[in-house]
Image: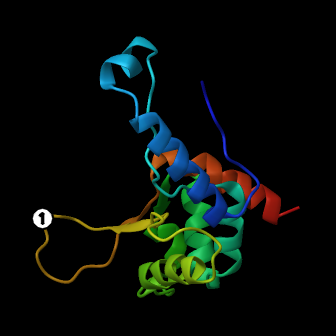
Amino acid sequence: MRITIDDIPDEIAQEIATGLIALVAQHTPVQLAEHKAVVMSLTPEWTPDRAAAFMRDIPAMADRIVRLAAANNGWADASELRGPEGEDSLRGQTTAITKAVKRGARKGLWPEGMQVPVSATYDANVQSYQRTSGFSMPAELVPIFQDAIRRLDK
């Protein structure tokens, strides 16, 4: 059995999902194993609609980072973002992205605890200050953000 809760406000979906999980939890593990049941967690997930709303709320450079990461299967190389002379700064972009995720949760656009879609990558062997080599996006988010970008660019 698969139940999909879609196209309703997150708080209502959360309430329904919590009730369904409580109902499933009333059965013993043996009963569940007989039916190969899988209990899903209530981890907040990105959807194309949420990703599009997020992208409408981030600064231009952060938008470039997310778009490049989505276009390149989860990797946005810093050299492509900094420009031909390396003149564009990437400082503060992960903060802007993190704040946009938190702001969206406060506005009720998505639940608290959403995964930040991109993170800066650094050389672990360098202990002092360094510029990021790029930004990575988890593989499972790439198609979601690609879909959101197509929607935004229509």
Residue 149 at x, y = what percent? Answer: 73, 60
Nearest to the observer: residue 62 or residue 123 = 62
The image shows residue 130, relative to residue 24, as above or below, that is: below
Q: Residue at x 71, y 66 (%)?
A: 52
The spot of residue 79 in percent (x, y) is 46, 69
Quarter of the picture containing the N terminus is top right
Please tell me which residue lies in front, 84 or 92: 92
Left or right of 82: which side holds 27? Answer: left
In the rendering, at what x and y percent does residue 128 appear?
A: 13, 81
Q: Is residue 99 above or below residue 36?
A: below
Residue at image position (46%, 40%) is: 40
In the displayed structure image, the side of residue 71 where residue 22 appears, left or right? left
Image quadrant assignment for residue 100? bottom right
Residue 73 appears in the figure: no
Q: Residue furthest top?
A: 34
Q: Secondary structure at mark 1?
A: loop
* Residue at 40%, 67% in the rendered image: 119
Identify which residue is drawn at 72% across, 52% down: 147
- Quadrant including the C terminus: bottom right
Q: Which residue is mark 1?
A: 125
Any part of residue 103 in sight: yes
Dividing the picture into quadrants, the one containing residue 25 is: top left
Q: Amino acid at mark 1?
A: Asn
